[in-house]
């Protein structure tokens, strides 16, 4: 599910309707470790990166270095953890029927194939 899958959930499922605004907010912070970027929070990330480049030029945490480590700690841990209560609150007060409908959003028939990715993986995509 999500960016890393050959299939994704249809936008009109109860789950996607419930979480779509939250997912956009999460994306705006670049909170996902894979497939996200920090373009909307460069004003936060750039000064931290510059500080480390200037003050700790020999600091190169394994395996990917300063910028990736800063991204992990700020975006993928600090900001992501701060978003957890907001996500959890989306489910607060829902009835049993609403929760069942959310769960049914994850049924196979509620997914669609990423056709271009399927073509690439199957070797049907023309080279660009």
Image (cartoon, helix red, strand yellow):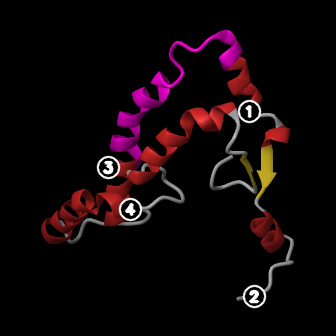
Measure the alpha-carbon separation of dots 4 and 1.
Answer: 34 Å
Give the residue displayed 41% in from the left and 26% down from the top: 85
Q: Which residue is mark 3?
A: 74
Residue 31 location (% of width, % of height): 43, 49
Q: Residues within 10 Å of mark 2 (few under 14, many from 20)?
A: few
Is 125 contained in the magenta span? Answer: no
The nearer-to-camera label among 1 and 3 is 1
Give the residue displayed 67% in from the left and 31% down from the top: 14
Measure the alpha-carbon separation of dots 2 and 4.
Answer: 30 Å
Name the element at disc 4.
helix
Location of residue 67 by image quarter: bottom left
Give the residue displayed 81% in from the left and 70% down from the top: 121
The nearer-to-camera label among 1 and 2 is 1
The nearer-to-camera label among 2 and 4 is 2
For marks 1 and 2 on the same chain, the one whose residue lies earlier in the sequence: 1
Q: Which residue is mark 2?
A: 127
Q: Which residues are magenta?
A: 76-98
Residue 105 location (% of width, % of height): 73, 32
For marks 1 and 3 on the same chain, the one whose residue lies earlier in the sequence: 3
> Which of these two is toward me, 77 or 116?
116
Q: Is residue 91 placed above or below 19 in the rendered structure? A: above
């Amino acid at each position: 599910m999500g960016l890393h899958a050959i299939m994704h959930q249809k936008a009109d499922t109860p789950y996607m309707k419930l979480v779509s605004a939250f997912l956009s907010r999460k994306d705006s912070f670049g909170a996902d470790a894979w497939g996200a970027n920090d373009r909307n929070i460069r004003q936060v990330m750039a000064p931290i990166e510059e500080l480390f480049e200037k003050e700790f030029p020999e600091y190169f945490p394994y395996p990917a270095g300063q910028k990736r480590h800063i991204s992990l700690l700020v975006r993928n841990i600090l900001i992501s953890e701060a978003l957890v209560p907001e996500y959890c609150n989306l489910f607060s007060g829902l009835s049993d029927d609403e929760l069942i409908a959310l769960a049914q959003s994850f049924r196979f028939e509620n997914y669609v194939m990423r056709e271009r990715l399927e073509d690439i993986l199957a070797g049907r995509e023309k080279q660009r």
